[in-house]
């Protein structure tokens, strides 16, 4: 079903290269089914163990987030004193990152619905960002997590703006890849807000502007509230410190945007992460879906504090496997998932933040160029035994996915 290109020694490799495997990785039907059973069992054990510790964890994070916000807002009232302004921006930035990553993202995945706490209900929760939560749940929870890295279905591949995969046909427009990526990074919350509009389909006239009107109403309600709060209300409340508070709030939003962009892109686009076609993923079994999640994701190594500040999306592999499990459990699940990958000869893509960020940006520059100007990459397939259309077992059939390097 899937294809895999192991990291090689390509152009702009980012220092994360490994020799390409000479032979394909072959998974039998029994192996794929075993992977599915083992990961289902791991999920069931984790769900059965959810309890007071998980409840206490999310409440501690919420309490910390609120304290950082109060401290940040308060310190910006003393913006005439530079150290207070810097401390205020830092504190508010931490607050916004925690709200976005460890609280908002994870709560809206339903990770804490089992608590039956109204304020942590995935269907009603709103976060401190301009994107309406209902639109995010559609574009992210449904589209991205269902069709992870399937070209033409997962719009997170390039966000409709970037060329991040060799299967995306090159066009002179993509010469601006690094510029578009920088703009998306700096304005990431706004890029996420517009994600469901599918602007590229509007430009190509596959979609009408009229289709966007219901979305635009949600944008207006949510973005208006956020803009008034950060750029009007709090600056006005600070009186003579209006400008320092305005700049401080804008800076905190910028820090949050850059951090969120970096963590998300490191989990989806570094060297070695795979993409797939619709044909390759048709009629997936549970085990095949799990394998796609593992091949289409990457982790970032770091300290416990780093993992908290990333919303534990530094464990993107585990998140794609178990999106509705409390993310703070991913560090304990990761060694078991890695051992399962090693058992079946599958890669487990992980690296430090600098290495993963470098790999992502080198790919952004690489795919800005016409294919003729970059050297082809060695490829190694993952072969999975799939049943034929007649229902009988076919010979081992390999599908070659594209390595995103």
Image: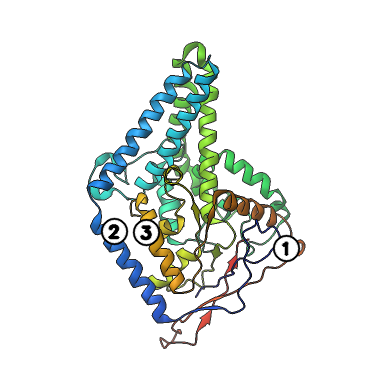
Residue displayed at 34% across by 41% down? 125
Compared across the picture, whether 369 is left or right of 295 comes to right
Q: SS class of the residue under badge 3?
A: helix
Q: Which residue is mark 3?
A: 333
Which mark, residue 340? none
Q: How is the image coloured?
A: rainbow
Residue 10 rendering spot, x and y as whole percentages: 69, 63
In the displayed structure image, the side of residue 46 where residue 6 appears, left or right: right
Label 3 close to label 2 by CB (< 8 Å): yes
Q: Quadrant of the C terminus?
A: bottom right
**C-alpha distance separating marks 1 and 2:** 45 Å
- Looking at marks 3 and 2 on the same chain, the residue that comes earlier in the sequence is marked by 2
Q: Are marks 1 and 3 in contact (CB under 8 Å)?
A: no
Q: Nearer the viewer, mark 1 or mark 2?
A: 2
Image spot of residue 185 (x, y percent): 58, 42
Residue toward you, 312 or 279: 312
Quadrant position of residue 320:
bottom left
Q: Secondary structure at mark 2?
A: helix
Counting residues from the N terminus, which is met first, the one under dot 1 or under dot 3?
Answer: 3
Residue at horizontal 33%, vertical 36%? 62
In the structure shown, which secondary structural element does the residue marked by tag 1 occupy?
helix
- Toward the viewer: 160 or 304? 304
Residue in front for this viewpoint, 305 or 255:
305
Residue for point 37% across, 59% down? 333
Q: Which residue is mark 2?
A: 46
């Amino acid at each position: 079903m899937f294809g895999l290109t192991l990291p090689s020694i390509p152009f702009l490799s980012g220092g994360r290269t490994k020799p390409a495997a000479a032979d394909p990785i072959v998974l039998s039907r029994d192996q794929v089914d075993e992977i599915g059973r083992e990961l289902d069992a791991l999920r069931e054990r984790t769900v059965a163990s959810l309890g007071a510790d998980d409840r206490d964890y999310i409440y501690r994070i919420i309490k910390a987030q609120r304290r950082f916000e109060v401290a940040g807002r308060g310190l910006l009232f003393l913006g005439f004193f530079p150290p207070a302004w810097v401390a205020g921006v830092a504190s508010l930035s931490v607050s916004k990152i925690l709200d976005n990553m460890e609280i908002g993202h994870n709560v809206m995945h339903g990770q804490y619905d089992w608590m039956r706490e109204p304020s942590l209900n995935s269907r009603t929760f709103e976060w401190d960002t301009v994107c309406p939560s209902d639109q995010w749940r559609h574009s992210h929870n449904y589209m991205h997590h269902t069709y992870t890295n399937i070209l033409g279905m997962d719009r997170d591949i390039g966000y409709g703006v970037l060329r991040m995969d060799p299967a995306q046909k090159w066009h002179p427009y993509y010469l601006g890849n690094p510029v578009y990526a920088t703009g998306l990074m700096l304005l990431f919350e706004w890029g996420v807000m517009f994600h469901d509009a599918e602007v590229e389909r509007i430009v190509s006239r596959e979609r009408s502007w009229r289709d966007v009107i219901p979305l635009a109403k949600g944008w207006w309600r949510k973005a208006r509230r956020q803009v008034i709060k950060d750029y009007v209300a709090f600056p006005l409340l600070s009186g003579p410190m209006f400008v320092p508070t305005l700049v401080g709030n804008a800076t905190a939003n910028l820090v949050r945007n850059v951090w969120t962009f970096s963590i998300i892109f490191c989990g989806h686009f570094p060297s070695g992460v795979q993409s797939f076609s619709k044909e390759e993923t048709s009629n997936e079994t549970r085990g095949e879906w799990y394998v796609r999640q593992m091949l289409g994701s990457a982790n970032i190594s770091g300290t416990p504090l780093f993992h908290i500040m990333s919303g534990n999306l530094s464990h993107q592999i585990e998140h794609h496997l178990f999106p509705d499990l409390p993310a703070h459990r991913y560090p304990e699940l990761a060694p078991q998932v890695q051992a399962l990958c090693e058992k079946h000869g599958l890669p487990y893509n992980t690296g430090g933040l600098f290495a993963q960020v470098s790999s992502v940006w080198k790919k952004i520059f690489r795919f800005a160029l016409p294919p003729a100007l970059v050297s082809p990459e060695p490829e190694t397939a993952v072969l999975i035994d799939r049943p034929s259309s007649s229902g009988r077992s076919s010979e081992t059939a390999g599908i070659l996915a594209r390595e995103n390097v």
